[in-house]
Image (cartoon, rainbow, N blue to C red):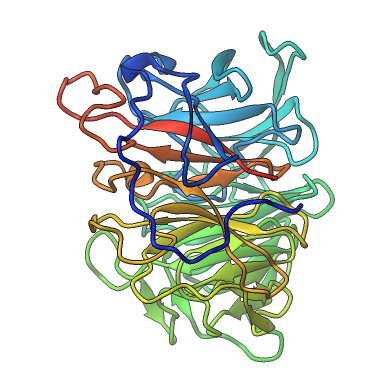
């Protein structure tokens, strides 16, 4: 897809005056930033969107969950309490579909199908065509079953829940011993391959309950044994990305043995003992596409199949460029990967171009950067998702959805305590 967004390197500041967004209940309010003509903002949520009046509304804690439907008509938002709501993205109104299931997401292929993780169970949810009700809700697999984690396994924490871009494979990670930082099980299931479990503490892999053996990198054994910070990422059915935790909740090291990588992912080839340590400039948050992922300040491209290749730099952001989180659910390998830049320690005036903006990075190594629009976020919210303006790109590549406080100071209303400024989810229709 060709976008008509600006591609210059001019340092831009926040608009003056800032938009007002209709107060606490201004869902549906639209606005166009004069510095980004053609890009239309729509406020999707408001104070009354949540069942809990005044609750902040958000996207997700990364660009990984697939929150948008394949036809681009619906988007999932979440309240700070974890409840999910499906929003009509065209009218900015709530449908009658909402859920307490963890990690509610859309299918990669079917607009009326959602998938969720319910404790350890994968649920397939089909909605009626008019979005008035759920037509069916069924468990298609439970990781706590024979041939997987075992009957009676009780999850105390789960990581990223991802759906492969062909809708065949479901991946996540678990702990049964505490919260984040205590997990040791990375799991994957498909109807064709069954369940595979990578035990990161023991360094072994099981498939359908049978021990395959100790992990290796394709030729050599790996001695790394560790607890998980995260696990289960990636759109490709064959690979699952995972990261160690630097320290467990009790303060002890997350690396138990070997030379564990810090701030670098590992890639597990699902249903095999092959685990690839990614020590090839894989630092930072990454945008994960169907064939590989993009990481770091230069958005280097790494193939899942061979992470040291091709290391093509897709961007060249200036010194002082803030942190960023990516999303690549627009799926086509020739399309841009998207990211949001965000500074949680606000700097004013903005020091470099692209600051607190929604950006598109073409994957042709041209190092052009599409500047889609500003997030107008302060980075001061107490909620991680709002602090970092976490964004998800629609599957059709037409819209970017992000969380923002839009300048704070209660411009979007306040939470129930009357003190905490709210955040909401906004749709940025991209210029194409």
Direction from residue 241 to residue 245 in the image, left or right: left
Residue 183 image-quadrant placement: bottom left
Q: Residue at x 23, y 58 (%)?
A: 347
Q: In terms of image quadrants, where is residue 305?
A: bottom right
Residue extending furthest toward the right: 192
- Compared with 77, 9 (above or below) is below
Residue 336, how many percent across, how many down? 67, 59
Q: In which quarter of the image is the C terminus?
A: top right
Q: In this view, does 185 lie above or below 124?
A: below
Camera-nearest residue between 258 and 312: 312
Given residues 189 and 204, the one toward you in this image is: 189
At a point 65% along the width and 75% down the height, the residue shown is: 302
Extreme bottom residue here? 220
Task: Report the residue that reaches farthest toward the top.
Answer: 132
Can you give x and y, in whole percent of width and height, for residue 213 in the image? 67, 75
Residue 154 rendering spot, x and y as whole percentages? 47, 42
Camera sees residue 158: no
Compared with 140, 27 (above or below) is above
Q: Where does the image place residue 392, in percent across and percent down from the top left?
A: 56, 45
Q: Give the vertical position of 184 relative to 299 (above or below).
A: above
Residue drawn where x is 23% and y is 56% of the image: 348
Counting labels gives: 0
Q: Which residue is at the front of the view, 226 or 94?
A: 94
User: Residue drawn 38% across and 68% down?
Assistant: 321
Q: Is residue 221 at all visible to an observer of this figure?
A: yes
């Amino acid at each position: 897809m060709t976008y008509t967004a600006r591609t210059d390197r001019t340092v831009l500041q926040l608009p003056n005056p800032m938009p007002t967004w209709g107060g606490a209940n201004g869902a549906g309010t639209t606005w166009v930033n004069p510095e980004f003509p053609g890009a239309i903002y729509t406020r999707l949520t408001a104070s009354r969107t949540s069942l809990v009046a005044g609750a902040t509304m958000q996207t997700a804690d990364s660009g990984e969950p697939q929150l948008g439907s394949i036809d681009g008509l619906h988007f999932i938002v979440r309240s700070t309490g974890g409840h999910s709501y499906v929003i009509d993205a065209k009218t900015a109104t709530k449908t009658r579909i909402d859920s307490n299931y963890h990690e509610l997401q859309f299918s990669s292929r079917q607009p009326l199908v959602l998938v969720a993780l319910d404790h350890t169970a994968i649920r397939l949810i089909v909605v009626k065509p008019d979005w008035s009700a759920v037509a069916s809700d069924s468990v298609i697999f439970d990781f706590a079953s024979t041939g997987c984690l075992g009957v009676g396994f009780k999850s105390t924490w789960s990581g990223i829940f991802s759906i492969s871009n062909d809708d065949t494979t479901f991946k996540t990670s678990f702990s049964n011993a505490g919260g984040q930082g205590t997990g040791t099980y990375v799991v994957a299931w498909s109807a064709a391959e069954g369940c595979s479990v990578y035990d990161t503490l023991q360094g072994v892999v099981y498939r359908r309950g049978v021990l395959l053996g100790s992990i290796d990198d394709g030729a050599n054994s790996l001695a790394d044994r560790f607890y998980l910070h995260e696990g289960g990422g990636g759109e490709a059915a064959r690979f699952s990305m995972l990261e160690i935790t630097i320290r467990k909740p009790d303060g002890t090291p997350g690396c138990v043995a070997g030379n564990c990588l810090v701030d670098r992912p590992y890639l597990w080839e699902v249903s095999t003992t092959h685990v690839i340590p990614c020590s090839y400039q894989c630092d930072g948050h990454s945008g994960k596409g169907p064939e590989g992922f993009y990481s770091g300040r230069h958005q280097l491209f790494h193939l899942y199949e061979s992470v040291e290749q091709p290391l093509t730099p897709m961007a060249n952001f200036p010194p002082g460029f803030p942190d960023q989180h990516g999303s690549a659910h627009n799926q086509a390998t020739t399309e841009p990967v998207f990211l949001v830049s965000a500074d949680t320690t606000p700097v004013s005036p903005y020091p470099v171009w692209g600051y607190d903006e929604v950006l598109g990075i073409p994957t042709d190594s041209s190092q052009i950067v599409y500047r889609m629009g500003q997030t107008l976020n302060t980075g001061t919210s107490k909620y991680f998702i709002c602090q970092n303006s976490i964004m998800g790109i629609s599957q059709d590549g037409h819209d970017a959805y992000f969380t923002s406080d839009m300048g704070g100071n209660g411009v979007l209303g306040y939470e129930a305590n009357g003190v905490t400024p709210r955040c909401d989810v906004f749709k940025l229709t991209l210029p194409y």
